Image (spheres, rainbow, N blue to C red):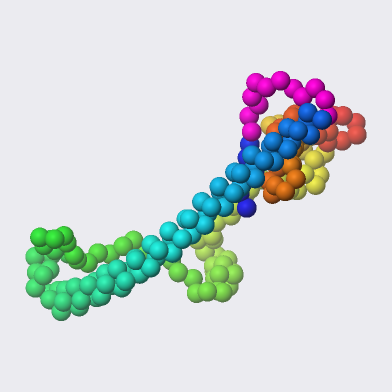
Amino acid sequence: MAAKPKLKAIAMPAAQRQDEVDLMIGKIGEAQRKIESIDAALTANIADLQAEAKEEIEPLKVKVGEYLQAIMAWAQANKDTLTVDGRRTINVSQGSFGWRWPPPSVKVKRGCLDAVIETLRARRLKQFLRTITELDKEAILRAPDLVTKVPDIEVRQDEVFFVKPLKVESEMTATVSSVFVPTNATGE
């Protein structure tokens, strides 16, 4: 589903009567349906182009893999003579090939992470463990009155105006106001 469009206010006279509002919502719906139709056609065209490209690319990938295997087999068989002077990269007229050591990486056997962490803790190897502290915004929303005296935190809520025409999936929204949410009955 497409993201809801954010509309900026434009210089247009305000509706004067409810029947004008009804007419404007109809025009929004008409325009939005056209947008959705164009977007759907675009998505379909992209999917078709991706399928065509994948069909053309796949045999090329197979060929590249075959060439890579052939070059690697020859290079491995001749590695001693190719790297006699310590070079690990061999330049040829069409490019280069060679061997390199990428940076080491740490792998943990699938499903064993918790056991590895516990083993490191038990062996007092905590220098290999990291603790991440994050702000739990959901917890603050559940108990906002507990953070009233904490500087630089406030709980706010936006009032949003929306228009949703008939037969249109998305609705248009605009923020009307943003208000501070009182965190306790005493108003502290």
Residue at the spot x=11%, y=62% of the render? 92
- Left of 110 or right of it: where is 10? right
User: Which region is colored magenta?
Assistant: 7-18
- Left of 55 or right of it: where is 76? left
Is residue 124 part of the magenta span, yes or no?
A: no
Q: Nearer the viewer, residue 149 or 63?
A: 63
Q: Nearer the viewer, residue 1 or 47?
A: 47
Q: Nearer the viewer, residue 148 or 53?
A: 53
Q: Is 5 above or below relative to 15?
A: below
- Residue 166 in percent (x, y) is at 75, 45
Residue at the spot x=59%, y=70% of the render? 114
Q: Nearer the viewer, residue 19 or 79?
A: 19
- Left of 157 or right of it: where is 49? left
- Residue 68 in percent (x, y) is at 24, 71
- Residue 57 in percent (x, y) is at 34, 65
Most frequent secondary structure within the magenta stretch: loop
Residue at the spot x=19%, y=73% of the render? 71
Is residue 9 part of the magenta span, yes or no?
A: yes
